[in-house]
Image (spheres, helix red, strand yellow):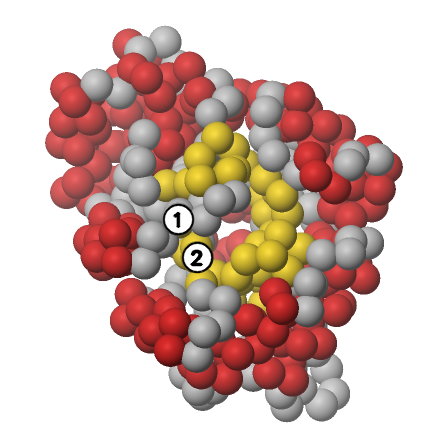
Amino acid sequence: MQYRRLGRSGLQVSEFSLGSWVTYHNQVDTHAATEMLAAAMDAGVNFFDNAEVYAMGKSEEVMGAAFKALKWGRHRFVVSTKFFWGLQREGVTANFKDTLNRKYLMQAIDGSLKRMQLDFIDLVYCHRPDPHTPIEETVWAMSDMISQGKALYWGTSEWSAADIRAAYEIAERHHLHKPVMEQPQYNVFHRRRVEQEYARLYEDMGLGLTTWSPLASGLLTGKYRGGIPEGSRGAMESMSWLREQLLDERKNAAVAELSTLAAELGGNVAQLALAWVNRNPRVSTVILGASKLSQLHDNLGALALTPKLTPEVLERIDAITLPLADQKG
């Protein structure tokens, strides 16, 4: 396992990390989470990703209980959470739903710290942009989280390049803590934002990336080529909005071609897709998702495949996937 600086910061994160979206609480209980976190750490993973809204706070509780059971020293791991959607889904929701206002953010960090049983969280993200709250208000609140010692670094997730730059310039103007990372979706079918829109930000700001959905929600595993398997993410009612993408005939045909290429390299299509994201020097870490231990071990096999992605192999991948990139299924 290699370690990379998070953008221009001094923090180093493992090239592969472990996330909890969809799986924790829904598919992975505390015992299984503890087992997978331990296996990931044994493989060299030091970064674990979460969000307030995952399983409506239960994901943070599961991960926090797993950390406590493992009794790791706090210096050994980096953990994140993200704020925007809030947990208030009934009753009065003004100021606590789909927002990045100061009141919500300053209370959201306290809730996450309590659920995760931690004194501080390493990385905190604005999970989506909020067009109704001035960016300056959000920047001050996120910076204050760091000044208060509740978080160490802050960043964004799925923000436009223009909004990220605006936040950075506000922080610079007022001598506040600047955003240092973005968490975008990035895979062979979803490229434009990382490779084009953010291009200037890497040098201008030193932006780091903690990318999600490297397997396109499971499409790039090949398991949806014959339909929606029972027990898969696509079969979950809460994930029904993904099914059209997962059953896209052209993309599944491309996955079949990628599977052949992966076999030539001594791996499988999921490992090839993960290695493809990992080989991008702008990516600080690739967030993996796993619902069982064997899946985690298999995904970590991408480490061996990454050096095999020669320019010739990358050209073959582009020939298969570029015509379908950034098209909705």
What amino acid does circle 1 point to? Arg
Residue on which the image places disc 2: 180
Place of residue 253 in the rendered image (x, y in percent of width and height, measured from the top left): 26, 32
Can residue 237 be seen by looking at this rendering? no
Q: Looking at the image, do the residues carrying marks 1 and 2 touch, with CB atoms under 8 Å apart?
A: yes
Please state if 254 lies on the left or on the right of 115 as rendered. left
Can residue 139 be seen by looking at this rendering? yes
Place of residue 267 in the rendered image (x, y in percent of width and height, measured from the top left): 39, 14
Which mark is first along the chain, 2 or 1? 1
Q: Is residue 39 above or below residue 103?
A: above
- The dot on residue 8 is 1
Q: What residue is drawn where x is 74% and y is 41%?
A: 74
Q: What residue is drawn where x is 39% and y is 48%?
A: 8
Tell me the CA gap for discs 1 and 2: 7 Å
Q: What residue is drawn where x is 48% and y is 30%?
A: 3
Q: Residues within 10 Å of mark 1 (few under 14, many from 20)?
A: some
What amino acid does circle 2 point to? Val
Place of residue 72 in the rendered image (x, y in percent of width and height, measured from the top left): 78, 35
Q: What residue is drawn where x is 31% and y is 11%?
A: 265
Pick the residue in front: 122 or 42.
122
Place of residue 272 in the rendered image (x, y in percent of width and height, measured from the top left): 35, 24
Residue 23's image quarter? top right
From this viewpoint, which residue is outermost toward the front?
Answer: 175
